[in-house]
């Protein structure tokens, strides 16, 4: 498992469960950071390149900007079905989803 502090324990399902509240604040859409599969310093199968900082915080990002599985949802955030569910729930409310996707 990943560092729960690094991932803030938020999930795609959690966002979907709070859409009424979010919309009630006047938001018309969401812009989320990438949720694709990311390097995890606790995953020893990935080899070198993602080691913890000396203060034991991962230098691997929890915001999707250190991706390595472009077609997968990172397990910390949920599943592909959770992503589809979020998009459907947004569209039911006439809200939009802007998804940040970084390729460099």
Image (cartoon, helix red, strand yellow):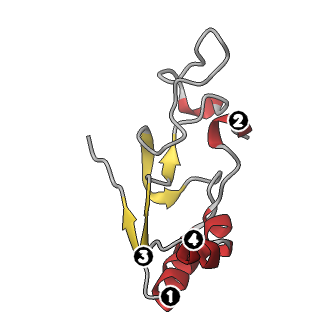
Examine the image and state in which quarter residue 89 appears: bottom right
Which element is circle 1 on? loop
Rounded to the nearest whole Å, what is the CA distance between mark 1 and mark 4?
11 Å
Q: Which residue is mark 2?
A: 5
Which element is circle 3 on? loop
Of labels 2 and 4, earlier in sequence is 2
Q: Give residue 7's mark.
A: none
Q: Nearer the viewer, mark 2 or mark 3?
A: 3
Q: Give residue 22's mark.
A: 4
Q: Which residue is mark 1?
A: 93
Q: Which residue is mark 3?
A: 28
Of labels 1 and 4, earlier in sequence is 4
Of labels 3 and 4, earlier in sequence is 4
Rounded to the nearest whole Å, what is the CA distance between mark 2 and mark 4?
23 Å
Most foreground residue, 95 or 10: 95
Rounded to the nearest whole Å, what is the CA distance between mark 2 and mark 3?
29 Å
Q: Residue at x 57, y 77 (%)?
A: 24
Q: Residue 69 placed where, x, y %?
A: 45, 50
Mark 3 crowdedness (10 Å alpha carbons): few <14, some 14-19, many ≥20: some
Which element is circle 4 on? helix
Q: Residue 66 placed where, x, y %?
A: 43, 37
* As drawn, 75 above or below 28: above
């Amino acid at each position: 498992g990943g560092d729960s502090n690094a991932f803030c324990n938020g999930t795609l399902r959690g966002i979907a469960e709070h859409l009424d509240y979010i919309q009630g604040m006047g938001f018309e859409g969401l812009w989320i950071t990438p949720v694709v599969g990311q390097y995890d310093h606790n995953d020893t199968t990935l080899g070198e390149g993602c080691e913890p900082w000396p203060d034991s915080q991962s230098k691997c990002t929890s915001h999707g900007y250190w991706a390595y599985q472009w077609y997968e949802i990172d397990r910390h955030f949920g599943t592909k079905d959770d992503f589809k569910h979020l998009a459907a729930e947004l569209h039911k409310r006439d809200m939009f989803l802007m998804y940040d996707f970084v390729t460099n």
